[in-house]
Amino acid sequence: MTTTEKVAYLKGLAEGMELNNDTKEGKILSAIIDVLNDMALDMEDLGEELTELGEQVDEIDEDLADVEDLLYEDEDEDEDFDFEDDDLFEVACPHCDAEFEVSEEELLADEGIECPMCGELLTFDIEECDGDCSCCEEDCDNKE
């Protein structure tokens, strides 16, 4: 039994008891039943609105999940991407013999690279391959 039905039952009981609305007790009981009826109707409206709001939140949650799938799908692809353009080169510091990796961009930088172990500034004299492959391995792209 809903709250609205219970209030209707109370209203029926009061009418069946033939309460006199001219007496103090009759007036107060009638007013209480009217307030209870209004509250029951308000609660019913709130329940319907809450159900509708819950459905809207569920729709928003589904839409957000779709957006997250799209965003994280892109990040997953980035993580799996093989960074061929950003190859790392292993370098040994001539001062402390520490080995570390640097990018091509760092190798070509005019200011040099600071050794992460001893702090010594390392500079590299890089020559471009002229195609005769005496400077690099046999699988050189410049080999004619």
Image: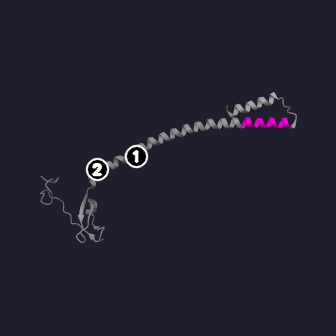
Helix, strand or loop status at disc 2: loop
Work out whether 85 lies above or below 37.
below
Q: State the separation of the CA atoms marked 1 and 2.
A: 18 Å
Q: Where residue 72 sits in the image (x, y, percent)?
A: 40, 46
Image-based side of 57 in relation to 40, left or right:
left
Instruction: Please name whichever residue, 108 or 53, is drawn nearer the observer in this view of the structure.
Output: 53
Report which residue position mark 1 lands on: 72
Which residue: 74% across, 37% down?
A: 36
Q: Residues within 10 Å of mark 2 (few under 14, many from 20)?
A: few
- Mostly what secondary structure, the magenta segment? helix
Which residue: 78% across, 30% down?
A: 13
Which residue: 34% across, 50% down?
A: 79
Residue 50: numbered disc: none
Q: Residues within 10 Å of mark 1 (few under 14, many from 20)?
A: few
Q: Where residue 25 sits in the image (x, y, percent)?
A: 85, 37
Q: Where residue 24 sits in the image (x, y, percent)?
A: 87, 38
Amino acid carrying mark 2 in the image: Asp
Which badge, 1 or 2, comes first in the chain's sequence?
Answer: 1
Report which residue position mark 2 lands on: 82
Instruction: Please name whichever residue, 5 or 44, is drawn nearer the observer in this view of the structure.
Output: 5
Looking at this view, name the residue that lies furthest to the top: 16
Which residue: 77% across, 35% down?
A: 33
Residues in magenta, as a range: 25-38
Instruction: Please name whichever residue, 136 or 142, is drawn nearer the observer in this view of the structure.
Output: 136
Residue 113 inside the magenta-drawn segment: no
Work out whether 100 lies above or below 78.
below
Image-based side of 142 in relation to 40, left or right:
left
Which image quadrant: the N terminus?
top right
Splitting the image into 4 quarters, where does residue 30 fall? top right
In contact (CB < 8 Å): disc 1 and disc 2 = no
